[in-house]
Image (cartoon, grey):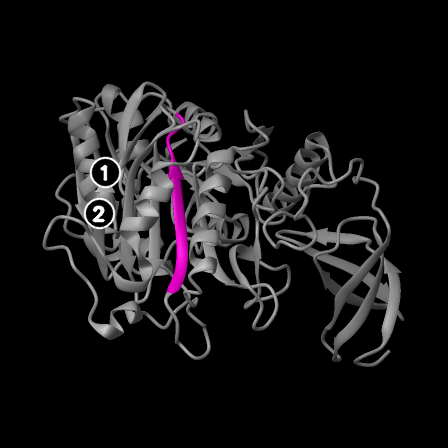
Amino acid sequence: MKKGDIVEGIITEYEFPNKAYMKVEDKRVLVKGALPGQYVSTRITKNRSEKAEALLLSVLKKGELEDREPICPHFGICGGCTYQTMSYENQLKLKEDMIHGMLNSVVKDDYSWDGILKSPLTEGYRNKMEFSFGDEVKDGPLSLGMHKKGSFHDIVTVSECKIVHPDFTAILKAIRDFYAERKVPFFHRMSHEGILRHLILRRSFADGALLINLVTSTQYRADGSEDISDGVYRCGVLALDELSKVLKGLKLSGRIAGFIHTQNDSMADAVIPERVVTVFGEDSIYEEILGLRFRISPFSFFQTNTKGCEVLYEKAREYVGETKDKVIFDLYSGTGTIAQMLAPVAKKVVGVEIIEEAVVAARENAKLNGLDNCEFIAGDVLKKIDEIEDKPDLIVLDPPRDGINPKALNKIIDFGVKNLVYISCKPSSLVRDLVTLQARGYRVTRAVAVDQFVNTVHTETICLLEQYNQR
């Protein structure tokens, strides 16, 4: 076996997030994108003494969990969904087996495994989607959608995406057609030339309100054309006044609450709001979770599956348990959703979040919900927890995908609280942090997986940890 060889094999091992393995000449070969039990054709891309990798060319025979046809016409081309050839029951089985297995590989003591909780919705469940402008083939027509499977550059127009509401795809198609007709160039990642970068759509499940955020470079101002003097926002080739008319004329089931224009000249392929202008309407929408109301601004974090979020937070609240007369730290608090779930029956909740806009939204949301025992602090958890005068009785952790900074984790452990509730959107980061937590005197007592990302490889996990010496 050497690089470039075409080889076939059966996927006999599968690991989170989407690592499939087959045996070739007694060597374990990684095949990204394959599924358990599939018989696949691959091309060897690496063959070293320590590892071998292969590119998936085709699936010659389906795996034992694949029991349906894909529900989306973009499946196999778009890189967004992975599990559409599986029934939802089989998706849950695969995810539960992976998460449970990962926890068992590091958890030292017996614990209660509460299985996997399903999403109430399996289609149209996302309340937010970030689409990219580009082309599907080099120098092809303008595309607006998701990255092509296995590509960093090619973009597939996902005009029939099944994990978002139909209003999203109607808006996506209208904006793509509008700029394709005007031949407005997209921003090229390599040359850093072009204008159109991203389209971010949000939708409230509470009232169907939509927030549209068009992200561009400032290269549209090359001719100096930008005029807002008479209250109408014009931007030369972007023609946002004309686009606004198109958007307002769409037949949607919800209403467009606001249209935002974000300018981003960063070299990174990420949305960085260097300047934000409201073209028309409002700059936020409102969502309701478990009886509480939340204002969601363009760049504040909010769980992307509203109905699944309720399942997640209900379980987290169960794990937290009795909160009367307790001071709770909600670290990596985002827009303060978890903090406000706990605040009505707690003495005080202190949230710490690095994104300042999210903290502003959290404070507004606390007022909106009539909660006066919430404090939200903007800054890095690593630095800010040293400055908090309150001492926690319990800590809730909901870090970003990369988990918790090791130095911050040690500071969190030093508080010595009896219980920690750790909510993770990336189980590999969670198990890494569990090694440290166990070494410093905590044990896992309960754990559960919560599926919020149907048809994809991702899953949320909640762990309840208890300090040994306070049992």
Query: Alpha-carbon neighbours of circle 2 within 10 Å: few (<14), some, or many (≥20)?
Result: some
Q: Name the magenta segment's main secondary structure.
A: strand
> Quick check: is 202 in the magenta stretch?
yes
Q: Which residues are magenta?
A: 196-205
Q: Residue at x 51, y 49 (%)?
A: 426
Disc 2 marks a residue whose amino acid type is Thr
Residue 282 in the image: x percent, y percent? 22, 38
Relative placement, left or right, of 342 versus 401 is left
Q: Nearer the viewer, residue 92 or 170?
A: 170
Q: How far apart are the alpha carbons under marks 1 and 2?
A: 7 Å
Q: Nearer the viewer, residue 407 or 228?
A: 228
Location of mark 1 (residue) = 281
Location of mark 2 (residue) = 278
Relative placement, left or right, of 18 versus 322 is right
Q: Are marks 1 and 2 in contact (CB under 8 Å)?
A: yes
Q: For residue 165, say whether it is visible.
A: no
Q: Nearer the viewer, residue 352 or 199?
A: 199
Q: Quadrant of residue 8?
A: bottom right
Disc 1 marks a residue whose amino acid type is Gly
Image: 20 above or below 99:
below
Residue 304 in the image: x percent, y percent? 44, 39
Q: Residue at x 28, y 25 (%)?
A: 293
Relative placement, left or right, of 217 versus 428 is left
Q: Which mark is residue 392?
A: none
Question: Callout 2: helix, strand or loop?
Answer: strand
Quarter placement of the N terminus: bottom right
Relative placement, left or right, of 244 versus 119 is left
